[in-house]
């Protein structure tokens, strides 16, 4: 049976919003030489270029950015979805910024990306220390979970939201989540004699990797998925599965 590998990037192949570590890069390049793999991330291409070495990007069969709303193959854009967020949604997000109990504001709180927006209380411009501070706060009060639940309940059949990384929420038209990336891959590769292996740090209910897991379940394909803590756990699993 042929193994196909699918990877989230931020928090799965790299530390959160940082570049791939040199030792892991060396391991991954060697490991992936005879493997078929795709990258599927919530970030845009600019962030992926910063975090991921060129060789890792160009050896991938495809790079899905912005929750699968954009696909690149060998640097060529194959498709891109559009999203014009309604004013009602933006008003709610600004209200959450006004009412939060978290005081630090780093800037860039509502980031427009192709096919989606990324929302962060602390802000996308936060330093790594500020990110860790907000993540600790969020683990205690479940702020992102509450915001995502509000959006999902009040914009049913129109807009969805899921938790991404350590500080943000990904918001997109219903169905335009990472599951669409798997639909594309499955259409290309099918199910016959294929086993899909997915790695994501948010591959759990409410996380922005979970819809891809649900899509694999829905299509009843042979698959495994791993909700990893970090790139080190990804490496341990890949080494143990040789």
Image (cartoon, rainbow, N blue to C red):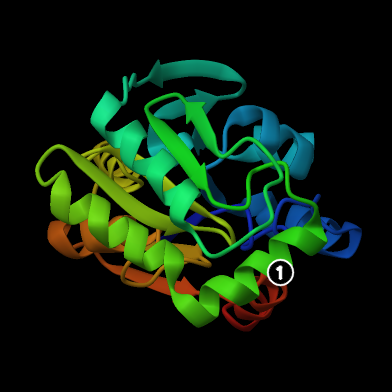
Residue carrying label 1: 133
In which quadrant of the rendered view does residue 222 lie?
bottom left
Q: Position of residue 32 (x, y in %)?
A: 67, 54
- Nearest the viewer among 199 and 86 is 86
Q: Residues within 10 Å of mark 1 (few under 14, many from 20)?
A: some
- Nearest the viewer among 137 and 206 is 137
- Nearest the viewer among 129 and 81 is 129
Q: Position of residue 116 (x, y in %)?
A: 39, 32
Specify whether residue 82 is in view.
Answer: yes
Vertical position of residue 178 compared to residue 13: above or below: above
Q: Position of residue 127 (x, y in %)?
A: 80, 52
**Residue at (31, 19) in percent of width and height:** 84
Vertical position of residue 217 compared to residue 117: above or below: below
In which quadrant of the rendered view does residue 89 lie?
top left
Quadrant holding the C terminus = bottom right
**Residue at (39, 18) in percent of width and height:** 79
Q: Secondary structure at mark 1?
A: helix
């Amino acid at each position: 049976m042929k193994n196909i590998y699918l990877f989230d990037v931020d928090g799965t192949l790299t530390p959160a919003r940082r570049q791939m570590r040199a030792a892991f890069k060396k391991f991954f390049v060697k490991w992936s030489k005879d493997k078929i793999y795709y990258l599927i991330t919530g970030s845009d291409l600019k962030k992926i270029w910063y975090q991921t070495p060129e060789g890792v990007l160009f050896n991938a069969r495809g790079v899905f950015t912005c929750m699968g709303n954009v696909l690149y193959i060998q640097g060529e854009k194959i498709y891109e979805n559009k999203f014009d967020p309604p004013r009602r949604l933006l008003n709610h997000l600004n209200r959450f910024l006004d009412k939060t109990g978290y005081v630090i504001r780093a800037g860039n709180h509502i980031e427009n990306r192709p096919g989606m927006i990324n929302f962060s209380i602390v802000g996308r411009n936060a330093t790594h220390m500020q990110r860790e501070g907000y993540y600790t706060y969020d683990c205690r009060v479940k702020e992102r979970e509450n915001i995502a639940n509000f959006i999902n309940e009040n914009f049913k059949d129109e807009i969805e939201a899921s938790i991404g990384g350590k500080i943000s929420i990904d918001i997109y038209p219903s169905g335009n989540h990472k599951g669409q990336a798997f639909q594309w891959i499955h259409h290309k590769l099918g199910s016959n004699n294929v086993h899909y292996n997915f790695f994501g740090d948010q591959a759990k209910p409410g996380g922005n990797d979970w819809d891809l897991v649900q899509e694999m379940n829905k299509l009843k394909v042979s698959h495994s998925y791993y909700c990893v803590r970090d790139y080190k756990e990804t490496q341990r699993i890949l080494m143990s599965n040789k």
